[in-house]
Image: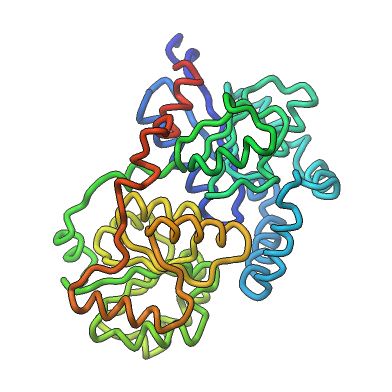
């Protein structure tokens, strides 16, 4: 009984605008529980939790904007780059979330709150100004520091690199409040799997293999891009991941062009770590979480049409350090695929230069948070 009462409760809040934010929350939750049985965790996407009907509509509108009006996303990102959430957004959050969130916190009685998305971060920040006495930890899930992440009352910011730390310092954040921990990833990505066993399990062939992610956000809806990939199907094994985009999955499954023994279609899966282990190259949108997972797995990356804003910043970070290459023309795909079929290396991942092997890092996110919780 006393042991149960002494457990630390950690509430991790996220939002569903891109899967990376919530994946980071779950990864951190798993890491904390593995470090100590004295920690209880709960991950909640506030929008879907409180507004299960409205949230999918908002997310779908955002997804359509990303797919069909990416320039608008970039304009909005840059316009707010040095600013916290504006008053209109704060008013909307107040009407949608504040009272419900306060009630939820009262019921769950957490000892600390971790936010992996700017929206819940702003909500908890306001509740702290209104009297909530709980430590608030903010995990920035990109390789940039947008102004919307900055909020009053944050006890510590967990950031990916020293560069992001320096950007926060320029925003007036105290150096003692910033921890360079890297972006938390699920412990499964730290495991090395037997490639031959996985090839057999997934029904694959021992041949050059390319993993393509980003289908959930329309990447596999680009006709010319798909045609270029399919043109290599006799020499390259293609693993196409659609994520939660069931419409795209159905469209490709019905297309006879994709009915080929070297093309494998995947919907939502929890085995991306294993698919990375059987792949020689990853083509993806440069989301912070996916790129971090690939970096840890040591898989070369190619980036397709980075979204203006944080994806451009992520792309710049990874390409400038030789961790990947941006696809500026479809001929770039031919060049890399040709090298794969000739058994020569593509982009060299310099593991010793990875932020996850950087001696300046405070250590991984879960261990740092564990120390702050004094478990």
Quadrant of the frame with the C terminus: top left
Q: Note whether residue 322 is visible.
A: yes
Q: Is residue 325 left or right of residue 156?
A: left
Residue, x 30% and y 46% (percent of image)? Answer: 352
Residue, x 16% and y 71% (percent of image)? Answer: 206
Scheme of colours in the image? rainbow
Residue, x 34% and y 88% (percent of image)? Answer: 231
Q: Quadrant of residue 264?
A: bottom left
Quadrant of the frame with the N terminus: top left
Residue sitting farthest toward the top: 2
Q: Is residue 101 above or below residue 297?
A: above
Residue, x 66% and y 38% (percent of image)? Answer: 170
- Residue 259 position, x and y percent, is 32, 86
- The residue closer to the viewer here, 111 or 342, is 342
Q: Is residue 316 above or below residue 352?
A: below
- Residue 20 position, x and y percent, is 51, 52
Q: Is residue 302 left or right of residue 142?
A: left
Q: Is residue 130 above or below residue 191?
A: above
**Number of marks present in the image shown:** 0
Q: Is residue 96 left or right of residue 224?
A: right
Q: Is residue 204 above or below residue 258?
A: above
Q: Note whether residue 25 is visible.
A: no
- The residue closer to the viewer here, 196 or 327, is 327
Q: Quadrant of residue 321?
A: bottom left
- Residue 157 position, x and y percent, is 58, 33
């Amino acid at each position: 009984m006393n042991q149960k009462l002494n457990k630390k409760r950690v509430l991790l809040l996220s939002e569903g605008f891109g899967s990376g934010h919530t994946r980071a929350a779950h990864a951190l939750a798993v890491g904390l529980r593995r470090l100590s049985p004295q920690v209880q965790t709960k991950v909640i996407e506030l929008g879907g939790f409180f507004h299960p009907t409205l949230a999918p509509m908002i997310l779908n509108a955002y997804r359509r904007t990303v797919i069909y009006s990416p320039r608008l996303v970039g304009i909005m990102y840059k316009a707010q780059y040095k600013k916290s959430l504006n008053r209109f957004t704060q008013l909307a959050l107040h009407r949608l979330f504040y009272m419900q969130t306060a009630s939820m916190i009262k019921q769950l009685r957490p000892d600390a709150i971790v936010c992996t998305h700017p929206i819940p971060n702003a909500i908890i920040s306001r509740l702290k100004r209104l009297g909530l006495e709980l430590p608030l930890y903010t995990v920035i899930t990109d390789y940039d520091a947008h102004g919307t992440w900055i909020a009053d009352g944050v006890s510590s910011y967990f950031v990916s690199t020293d560069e992001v730390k320096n950007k926060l310092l320029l925003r007036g954040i105290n150096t003692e409040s910033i921890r360079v921990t890297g972006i938390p990833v699920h412990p499964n990505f730290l495991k090395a799997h037997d490639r031959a066993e996985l090839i057999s399990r997934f029904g694959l062939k021992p041949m050059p293999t390319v993993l393509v992610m980003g289908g959930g956000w329309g990447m596999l809806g680009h006709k010319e891009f798909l045609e270029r990939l399919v043109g290599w199907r006799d020499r390259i094994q293609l693993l196409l991941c659609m994520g939660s985009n069931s419409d795209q999955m159905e469209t490709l499954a019905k297309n006879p062009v994709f009915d080929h023994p070297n093309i494998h279609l995947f919907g939502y899966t929890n085995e991306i770590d294993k698919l990375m282990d059987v792949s020689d190259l990853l083509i993806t949108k440069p989301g912070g979480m996916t790129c971090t997972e690939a970096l840890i797995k040591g898989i070369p990356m190619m980036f397709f049409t980075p979204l203006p804003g944080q994806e451009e910043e992520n792309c710049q970070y990874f390409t400038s350090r030789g961790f990947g290459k941006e696809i500026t023309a479809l001929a770039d795909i031919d060049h890399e695929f040709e090298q794969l079929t000739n058994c020569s290396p593509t982009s060299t991942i310099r593991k010793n230069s990875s932020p996850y092997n950087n001696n300046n890092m405070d250590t991984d996110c879960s261990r740092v948070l564990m120390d702050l919780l004094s478990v």
